[in-house]
Amino acid sequence: MIMTKDKQTLLSKIPSVDELLQNPITQKWDGSYPHILILDAIRSILERKREAILRNNDLKEGSIALSPDDILSEVETELITLSKLNLHSLINATGIIIHTNLGRSLLSDAAIKNVQDVAGNYTNLEFDVWEGKRGKRYSHVEEVLCRLTGGEAATVVNNNAAAVMLVLNTLALGKEVIVSRGELIEIGGSFRIPDVMERSGARLREVGATNKTHLKDYRDAVNSDTAVLLKVHTSNYKILGFTEEVSLNDLVELGKERGIPVIQDLGSGCFVDLKRYGIDDESTVQDSLRSGVDIVTFSGDKLLGGPQGGIIIGKKSYLDRIRENPLARAVRIDKMTLAGLEVTLREYFDEEKAIRNIPTLRMLCQTLEEIEKRAGRIVEGLQDIINEEVLDIRIKDGVSQSGGGALPLSNLRTKVVAVIPKEIKVTEFEKGLRENNPPVIVRIKDEEILLDPRTILDKDIEIIIEAVRRIGSELK
């Protein structure tokens, strides 16, 4: 960089940190912002001024704002940014119900209320109030889980990958686990079943081919070192066409014959027969346990609609061993997760209530008429800015998705609000929505912004209308 006289003059005009800290404007901020953030914001803006001066060889005096008032105006903007929480709420208008990147399942109002109550008070987390002595953490949900599913015993860890790892570490450490090659799935974040198995200390024994596995493949692979027969639900894909897999019932019979426990990793656990609501067949936890399987693991969020967790349920003799594993403490859940999970599970005592109150199920089971009505509310609120030459907005047919590695073949019919900007790129319009407060996250398809009411909460409809109106009005 060339240091010219003009640059030197401009650099000399940059106020010092101390000078800005003593400014009356800054003094007023001390009651609103932590001093450390004020200091960081001032240093950041001053450094940007220096870089701008050094980088540009055509700067003249007055071409860059260096007065204390101008600089502090930028500092205040920086302060607002620094003060925002990194994790915050946003609006999911994508139509992907269990959106992994957006926090997966939403909790019911009752679950949220219970989490707030438990978080703000001392609780009986590990205290038996009736006996006046130490209690067990998982007793709060074990009875409910067993009553709902028919399982003998249950426990919960922080996610389903941890559940699988804990079970295998307990039952198959240093021994073989037989699994179909077609079930060696990769789940979100590039986590693969073989990697989870390796970390558990178990040894993977693949059988069959990618598209076809027969009972004989399992039978021939069983040896004195076999500890577990594992069946994995292919949560996020289906193999179609020339394919065959061994049923859970047949695998259970083989396990009984050879005295080997059978574990099923369901991935996204479901307690409701979704076929009754016009959604693709999805195995329920109850179906799995009725087959006689020894252990079932599944997620507490996803289709179940609760907080993130990994649920392990099945034969008490195995659960007792799993709970005694020292690794169980490393992956245990906290009181807030338990609070949200218990309320969510209790909703399932009344299936109609569960469909109505649990957001994930409610979104999955929404009728097309309900969705179209909500789409109409959005379009009606934007009527005055619709201009076919500048901004076209209309309702059209679309497809929602379950997401979260569940129901991979279920394309749910929906009605979307299509926003078509004519004077700016669709990506610029999307950026404006994404930078709204709160951010509105949408899909782009065929140069159209798509807003899917299936995943838009009622309280967010007016916010979306105002966000689209604000961006659209700037185009007119």
Image: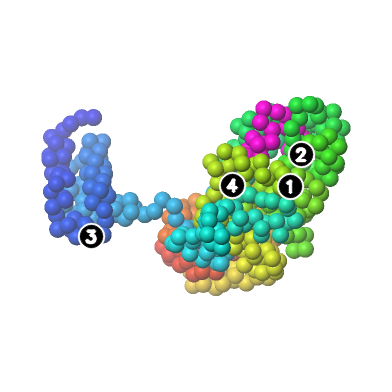
Callout 3 secondary element = loop
Is the residue 380 above or below the residue 259 in the image?
A: below
In the picture, which quadrant includes the N terminus?
A: top left
- What is the distance, in whole Å, between disc 4 and disc 3 at their CAs? 42 Å
Q: Which residue is mark 4?
A: 157
Left or right for 360, reference 148: left
* Mark linked to residue 315: 1
Q: Nearer the viewer, residue 100 or 293?
A: 293
Q: Are marks 2 and 3 in contact (CB under 8 Å)?
A: no
Type of amino acid under label 2: Pro
- Circle 4 sits in a helix, a strand or a loop, which is it? strand
Quadrant of residue 362 in the image? Answer: bottom right
The colour scheme applied to this rendered structure is rainbow
Q: Are marks 3 and 1 in contact (CB under 8 Å)?
A: no
Please provide percent x and percent y for residue 469.
Answer: 46, 66
CA gap between label 3 and label 1 equals 59 Å
For the residues labelled 1 and 4, say whether their Cβ atoms are less than 8 Å apart. Answer: no
> Who's the residue at 69% across and 51% down the image?
153
Disc 4 residue type (three-letter): Val
Residue 181 belongs to the span the image colors magenta: yes
User: Quarter holding the C terminus?
Assistant: bottom left
Tell me where the magenta segment starts and ends, as one range: 165-183
Residue type, label 3: Gly
421 within the magenta span: no
Q: Earlier in the sequence, mark 2 or mark 4?
A: 4
| 3 or 1: mark nearer the eye | 1
Badges 2 and 1: C-beta atoms under 8 Å apart? yes
Write the residue at 63% across / 30% down: 201
Instruction: Tell me the residue at 66%/47% (across/down).
Output: 312
Residue marked by disc 2: 261
